[in-house]
Amino acid sequence: MKNDRNTTSLVALGGLGEVGKNMYVITHGDELLIIDAGVMFPESDLLGVDYVIQDVTYLKQNEKKIKALIITHGHEDHIGGITFLLQNVDIPVIYAPKIASELIKNKLEDRNIGYKNIETIDGDTHLKFKNFDIEFVATTHSIPDSFALAIHTPNGTIFETGDFKFDLTPIGPMADLHKMAEIGKKGVKLLLSDSTNALSDGFSKSESLVDEALDDIVSKHHARIIIATFASNIYRVKHIVETCKKYNRKIVVFGRSMETSIELALNNGLITDKSIIIDYAKAKNLRKNEICILCTGSQGEPLAALSRIANGVHKQITLMPDDLVVFSSNPIPGNAASINKVINKLYLKGVKVFTNSEFSDIHASGHGKSEELKLMLRLIKPEYFMPMHGEYRMLKSHADIGVSCGIPRENIFILENGDTLELKDDIVKKGPKVQAGDVYVDGSRIGDIGSVIIKDRKLMSKDGILVTILNINPYTRELLIKPNITTRGFVLVNENAELIQKIERKVSEIVNNSLSSSAYNYTDLRNQIILELHPFISELTGRHPIILPVIMEVKVTK
């Protein structure tokens, strides 16, 4: 996409039509800014995929223009993709809040990436480029050091909220409402606003209500307490620690990400008493009402600490009948089934389980609900509005909220990843589309796990795999011994001898016909086996396993 030097363009490479994978790119002339570089965690149908990240082809095409990557806060859906981005694109500098900076440095160290040019920003930071002047505005979220961005361009101000809520009694600092109002009063051309909770009416719960609820639980339960929450919700972790200290409980931490968050909170003064954190060996000498176990696994992750505790396979923790397990979180969309499995296993162990509900306030979302979204719209007073960070239904609901706040519907853009907006001549309009999409990360492999491989994995998970091992003499063009048939996830060979024999005979027939009718060709023979065996097996069993012919050339001369 070629940019008019007088046009400011904006494109989302992630974050639209989905929750996660946030990345927004603003370009003017020969300068390009990237805002956030997050990951998205895969749905259950993306078998074997660890993360979903952005297609950064557009950034590669405009690499010489890139001036900086700017981070709004330290959650995975905003920083989790940085290590992958740095392997593909040259980023001159990363500007990030203090907590996010430390989390990013940990990630780089874990992956042995030697990138050092990370600059820490705060609410007083002003970044000046040739075409951009950027202010940072403190917001309230579930992690410290969260910021919105006011990006002043030659074609007007773009205000990007990051993730936010309005909490008038927060655990941490208040959002800078006065600065938001001041920027709005000066004039904002385009607002990009978090849509995650646009479908929820009213105001989100205050984090202080969660503090009160946890205080009530810890004070009244006179045995061991196990609390599972998001490790990234550092404010929640902070007041769990403070509540435990108040009631003379020591905390044992399980889960690497939780250990990292505790260490980060200690290093930044968010937790001040290190003595309250002990290892499990010391906890054995304490009474049950003096112990709180803080762990990962609030989303039912199979390998997380809580899942292993529920399954009875944790090396150190064995559940006791008078234990209380607290889920201080809400299910992320798609995780409800996994969480319910863990809860059922906990109940089977005889323990009491406490989850968030309308009758208990043990979790508060970090994302504003409809009334808070209205307040942001009223403070910023944009001429144009683009809902961001959310599935389509969330973006659509947020657009309707924008209309209710007086923004003309024709000035509101519900876009997809890759769509562009152009700011020029005092108007905002839709521009040409750029390449955008999903890139799958599987272990250390980035981008080579495509839709065909995912389809094969789904087929194997559903109907299994059938391997035919053939020994062929390429000189005499004959099958030396009968085919060897083995399967995984299709049928048990020992219990289906008749079916296996039919498949052996069919494979022998296909091979002998192919060898006698044409010049021997390894690839053609392999394809012919797959082509003829698929309908044959389907007719016999009604199933469609992946067929993998293995042809071994045994050169036997007489």
Image (spheres, grey):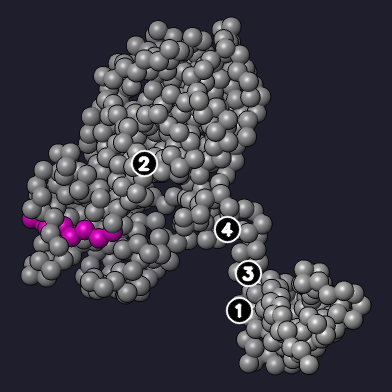
Instruction: Label 3, secondary structure: give it.
Output: helix
Residue tagged 4 = 45
Q: Amino acid at mark 4?
A: Asp
Which mark lies nearer to you, 4 or 1? Answer: 1
Query: What is the x, y in percent for residue 273?
Result: 9, 47
The disc placed on residue 134 is none
Q: Is residue 333 visible?
A: no
Q: What secondary structure is marked by label 2?
A: loop
Q: Earlier in the sequence, mark 1 or mark 3?
A: 3
From the viewer's side, name the closer residue of 131 and 78.
131
Per the model, the C-alpha gap separating discs 2 and 4 is: 24 Å
Query: Do callouts 4 and 3 mark residues in contact (Cβ within 8 Å)?
Result: no
Residue appearing at x 49%, y 40% in the figure = 88
Amino acid type for the residue under numbered disc 2: His
Q: Earlier in the sequence, mark 1 or mark 2?
A: 2
Rendering coords of residue 519 (x, y %): 87, 74
- According to the image, label 3 marks what residue? 460
- Give the CA separation, mark 4 to mark 1: 20 Å
Mark 3: which amino acid? Answer: Met
> Mark number for residue 488?
1
